[in-house]
Image: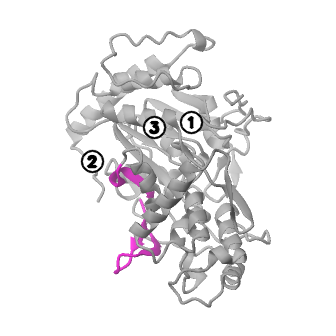
Amino acid sequence: MRTQRPRTGRARRVAALLAAVVTALTTLTALSVPAGAAEQAPFSEAGHAHCPQLDRDLDWHGHNRQKLQRVINRLGHCSVPREGERPVAVFDWDNTVTKNDITDLAIAWAINHDEILRPADWADTSPWLTANAVRTLTEACGTDVPVGSPLPTSSTPACADEIFSIRKDAALMSGEDAFEGDWNSRRTLPQYAWVPQLFAGHTEAEVNAIALASRRAALAAPEGATQRVGSHEVHAWARYYPQITDLISTLREAGFDVWIDSAGATPVTVPWAEGIGIGADHVIAIRNVLDDAGRISTTIKGCGGEPDGKGESIPYIEGKRCWLNQEVFGITGPEAWERQAPADRPAIAAGDANTDVSIVEDATAAHLVINRNQNEVMCKAYDNADRRWLINPMFIEPLPEKATPYPCSTTGFVNPDGSLGPVQREDGTIIGDQADTVYGD
């Protein structure tokens, strides 16, 4: 069971809020740099040598390391001794902590080693699968093996292809949509919710073992290595970003309460997080309900007062905020979906994609974005409304400059119904289109 911070009484909450405001203002002053003076800004670390230090030998873009060090120096226990609650730092996982997607690696391993168990009915795995998708999966994967037994996906390319195509593109191999119906596009994505449902029938320990096997293979594979999943060619390698693992270890040493908030499956994410010292009790990811025998079911836990279901409220965009508020700050019910006062928000948050935008923008001291050319989060980052957004190219294989500006003023924002619209600041004003200026060589 995850530890939660109990809600404080009114007096203590007011005091905490005032303290957080003072801290945020102090940090803002430290991080803000007058326009045009960024390269000349001094970054004196005098007086903080006793604080845990980020590795100076690891390359960061611009002054990002120094700015993060300032936050550590000012908010860490070396400068602000605390009793009880600690400043929170939260990280997305895929392509934020690691290069490449660990969920894809686990699914690829499961398919290539016959670890997907046959469901009684493919329709049970997701309420949004189309009738044609259910029929196609049934035909491609067959009905010869008993329900609950491993499908021979390693030797059945058609089955492997359809499963991986739905996971990757939300489409069948024919190109037809695999999902239909209504869902809140700021709280879930059907193909994301479908992944942990594919592991139904396994115990969490069995999926941990799949994740560990895929992790060993991916870390041992040379950079750029690929593998076949059916007829798909997909990445076969992954790496922990040294800069991020150093940041996480330094934050923990400085007294920060470090969490992972991922849209991956919990039993896949936990073994990777444990590899850098973050325990299961500090991993937020999609959580399946276990059946009476302790095996994973296709039912997924809900957030913010929403009932358990088929994945309507996973850690995805605003779902990440809900799960963080619920699991870390003890905020329950519909309030968990709302942006909280500074005392109940992370000090530092890091992500790389639109799926992370709610937790990253909620950070009170530093919003770290790894640039993968995702519209909404990059619009927020480049707009830099509070002067605390830090943009870094991917540490491995960074993307080149985006050829066209981010369409912030028109289609950068994903609405709940899936339509696109302009990206707005907190005050409702629209962010103008933004050029891509922080990229790889």
Image mark for residue 369: 1
Instruction: Name the quadrant containing residue 404.
Output: top right
Circle number at residue 245:
3
Q: Is residue 174 left or right of residue 192?
A: right
Q: Which residue was labeled with disc 2? A: 5
Q: Tell me where residue 98 appears, x and y as whole percent.
A: 54, 44
- SS label for mark 1: strand
Kindly report the distance in space between the C-alpha atoms of the residues bearing marks 1 and 3.
15 Å
Q: Is residue 179 left or right of residue 213?
A: right
Badge 1, how many Cα within 10 Å: few under 14, some, many 20+?
many
Q: Position of residue 125 (x, y in %)?
A: 55, 76
Q: Is residue 363 above or below residue 320?
A: above
Residues under labels 2 and 1: Cα distance?
27 Å
Q: Residues within 10 Å of mark 2 (few under 14, many from 20)?
A: some
Q: Report the mark closest to the observer, 1 or 3.
A: 3
What range is drawn magenta here?
A: 279-303
Q: Is residue 98 visible?
A: yes
In space, the residues marked 2 and 3 are separated at their CA atoms by 25 Å
> Which kind of residue does numbered mark 1 sit on?
Val
Instruction: Count the numbered circles shown.
Output: 3
Residue at 57% x, 8% y is 40
- Tell me, yes or no, whether the two marked residues, 2 and 1, touch with CB atoms within 8 Å: no
Under circle 3, the secondary element is helix
- Identify residue type, mark 3: Thr
